[in-house]
Image (cartoon, grey):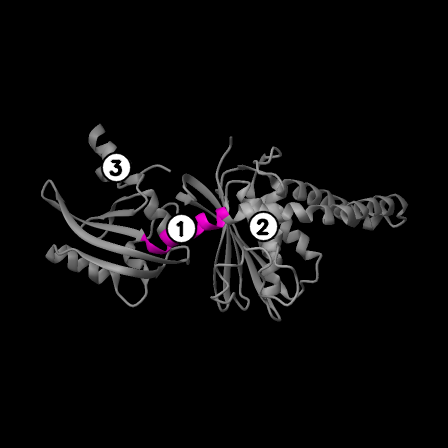
Amino acid sequence: MPIKLNTKRKPSDNYSRFNYEVLDNLRTGILILDHDLDYIFSNSAAYAILGISSNLPKITNLECEGLDLELYLKKVFGNNQSIILRDLKFKNFDSSERIVDCNISTYYVNKMKYVLVELNETARLYNISLDKSLLEQQKATREMIKGLSHEIKNPLGGIMGAAQLIDKNLKDKSVIKFTKIIAKESERLLKMINSLTSTSTSNEREILCIHEITDHVIDLFKYDKTENITFLKDYDPSIPEIILDKNQIIQSLINVVKNAIQAIVGSGTITLKTRTMLKYTIGDIKYDLVVKIDCIDDGIGIPEEKINEIFFPMVTTKNEGMGLGLTIAQSLITQNKGLIECQSKQGKTVFSLILPWSQD
């Protein structure tokens, strides 16, 4: 992503350009504003926090909880007294909730005064620590799945054989597409089980559009008993193609969507939302660009005491099931160097499949 800079005030030399590039690589969001609170500079981290990839709306349009940000910006500009707003909560321009420490100060360049805004995501720092714990936990999960794999392979082979026999003897050719789905999904599950017991990255990676996966998963559930569920798409069409193991990501997303369906009582809505994020840290690695698939449901939510345990084996908030769906989903995503995160409250749960962008 190029540096976001007011075209009327471009750096005049290589030294200035270097300074802007350093700012652009910081994890802290940096905004430089003039006396009208218009942008002079905004780095990539600021764009990610504010939830937009280009053409930032004016910072004064940001909806903050319990305060008027514009009032504080003008106050700092007027009296040159720095302030820090701890745990500032707001909805960004993509309607996602953020919590940041916001430091506002002034500085002078060639007798011109500017406002410097620093946005440091406090919630994200906590999540990075939690992410490391999740990655460590996946090692133990993999060993457990090895013990279960043979119990799944035997009946799966029978299903594949039965589907082939039905396909050969069908008189009504209009339903052949359904036996093809059975055979295709069975083969995918068999490959998925084999990959779950592997510690290495899949060698079946391919370059694809992420929306091939989201569309496929939505189509699968259209044939299920989900008449009470409305599926919505909120796609970013500018997301570049990415190299992934398609079958692994499909299975992971199926497990997440199935969990969302089970959380909805009566009728409800599930939204699949795709976005990119810049300068994102997974475990100990900082990636320049990641692709995020959000599965958003308006169900009952996850109890607060369970939210940090949902990816552990045998942990479930439902009366049925073994509590392995999300564990398997997390394992498959980590084999693609990514991670699944979750935020939940009554009426809104968001599972985020975060995948490093790569074409290598």
Determine whether the residue tagged by mark 1 lies in a helix, strand or loop: helix
Q: Earlier in the sequence, mark 3 or mark 1?
A: 3
Q: Amino acid at mark 2?
A: Ala
Q: Is residue 290 above or below residue 13?
A: below
Residue 235 vs residue 70: left or right? right
**Residue marked by disc 2:** 329
Q: Quadrant of the N terminus?
A: top left
Q: Position of residue 22 (x, y in %)?
A: 27, 36
Q: Which mark is residue 20?
A: 3
- Chain part drawn in magenta: 121-136
Foreground mark, 2 or 3, reads 2
Q: Earlier in the sequence, mark 2 or mark 3?
A: 3
Q: Amino acid at mark 3?
A: Tyr
Q: Main secondary structure of the magenta part?
A: helix
Examine the image and state in which quarter residue 279 appears.
top left
Foreground of the two, 8 or 251: 251
Q: Is residue 189 above or below residue 21?
A: below
Contact, mark 2 vs mark 1 (Cβ under 8 Å): no
Q: CA distance from mark 2 to mark 1?
A: 20 Å
Examine the image and state in which quarter residue 297 appears.
bottom right
Q: Position of residue 23 (x, y in %)?
A: 27, 40
